Amino acid sequence: MTDSTKIYQDEKSYIAEISNLSYSSAGVARFDGKVAFIPYTVTGDVVKFTVERDRKTYLDGKLKEILKSSPHRRTYPCPYFGNCGGCQWQHINYNYQVISKKNITKDILERIGRIANPDVSDTYTAGGEWNYRQRVRFQVGLEKNEICLGFNVYNSNKVVDIDNCYILKKPVVEVLKELKKYKNELRGILDFEIYYSSKENNFVFSGKAKEDNFNPSNLKKVSEIFKGGIVRTKKGRVFTLKDPYLTYSIELNRLSYNLKVYADGFIQANPEVNAVILNSIADYLGDNYQSATMLELFSGSGNFSFLFSKLCKYVVAVEGNNSSFRALEENIAKNNILNIHPIRAGVRDEVLKMFNNKRSFDLVFLDPPRIGAKEIMPYIPKFNPKIIIYLSCNPTTLARDIQTLAYSGYTIEKVVPFDMFPQTFHIETMVILKR
Ligand SMILES: C[S@@+](CC[C@H](N)C(=O)[O-])C[C@H]1O[C@@H](n2cnc3c(N)ncnc32)[C@H](O)[C@@H]1O
């Protein structure tokens, strides 16, 4: 990275060349002895920018003008891009998005995980860069007493009212259009998620109510759009709308199964990339672990558990969310699987309990939420697994956590970034460690 020359265009704006992309909406420039983060730029752009905030070690910049356009830039289809916080990278050629996710993963593992020169594979992609999301959370906003439905404005609580979205699966866009006809029914809702199942060609709704005295009969037309759903109030009251679950299919190279998910359970955002992740784990483990025992943490409703039940002798699957756990148990029963032992528990408590009981496992798989799994990392090596597979939607917490495993003698066998979230800076990463 070279320092850009500090040139005063006027009192407040500067010029810099963007040297790389960061794990955010911003491109990075070296400027005035500091690093400047300038949103909506890309490597090779020469830009005029203003300084929004001057922090001790870095600057937050605001793009004013592109003086020289990067070869990685492109025109993008979405009229809301730049204002809507849903996507951050639509202005970047898809090839370069994918290359950058590999580079960013490597950089984060080096900087935060202190792993020297990690061997990160090329980013795996699947299903195309548009219309990939089967799960979405919409915000409900109010502008001049009119309800708006969409995503938050970048870095703000304001809601961008959208009529279309290029990263949602097309049937989900159709549901959004339908919902807008009855948007006034959503006045009592803060935000809501929609899950779509292509197998059922149907949807479920999971809303958060603004007030505890929420009246679900207000959602008369809205609830007709969905197979069912739930609404939760801040104080924990739950209203159920019709049938609040979907069945969806996991189609893998050597296996397929159907899973049930409840409206307030968990489903991966991008089904095509999800299948690629499952297939790559199946290829890696192959038939070599038929007598192995597996501990699966953060199992959800069984997305990975069913694959593991075929690859290993038995799987202990730990999940804390009641709806996901209920679906997991029902999925095990429906698929008549005898070698998955589901445990409804907080992962921390269960791991401590297993540690006290001197349990051991040949394999450990974990797929935590964005905050990672810091508290349990010191205990995982105590189970003495030969292989640990850590899947993460946040490379910064992943890097922090696997550092603990490296201290316990585990070495990295494989790092694979998956593009689960095209047009955004988000990266799904799988790390396989061995001891
Ligand atoms: C990223 S999701 C992965 C789910 C599953 N592996 C899948 O692919 O569908 C994380 C899961 O961990 C669960 N979870 C989050 N924090 C937890 C905790 N402290 N204890 C137990 N489960 C937790 C969530 O309910 C969610 O199902």
Image: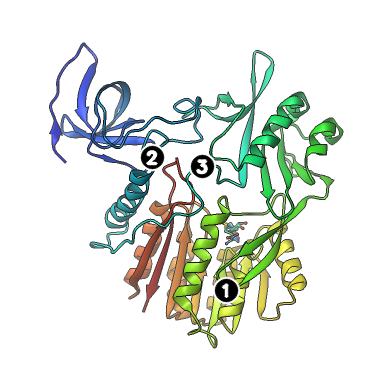
Q: Position of residue 5 (x, y in %)?
A: 12, 27
Query: Disc 3 versus disc 1: distance between alpha carbons?
Result: 27 Å
Say which element carries label 1. Answer: loop
Q: Quadrant of the C terminus?
A: bottom left
CB of residue at label 2: within 8 Å of ligand 1?
no
Pointer 2: what residue? 24
Direction bottom: furthest residue: 291
Q: Which disc, if any, is residue 130?
A: 3
Looking at the image, residue 130 lies above or below residue 373: above
| Total numbered labels | 3
Tag 2: amino acid: Ser
Please tell me in which quadrant of the rendered image residue 326 appears.
bottom right
Q: For this rendering, which residue is in front, 425 or 354? A: 425
Does residue 95 appear left or right of residue 256 in this picture?
A: left
Characterize the local packing of mark 1: few (<14), some (14-19) or many (20 or more) Cα atoms within 10 angstroms. Answer: few
Pointer 1: what residue? 254
Tag 3: amino acid: Trp
The mark that comes first in sequence, 2 or 1, is 2
Q: Where is residue 62 in the image (x, y as percent from the top left)?
A: 33, 24
CB of residue at label 3: within 8 Å of ligand 1?
no
Q: In which quarter of the image is the N terminus?
A: top left
Does residue 14 appear left or right of residue 90 in this picture?
A: left
Say which element carries label 3. Answer: loop
Tag 1: amino acid: Arg
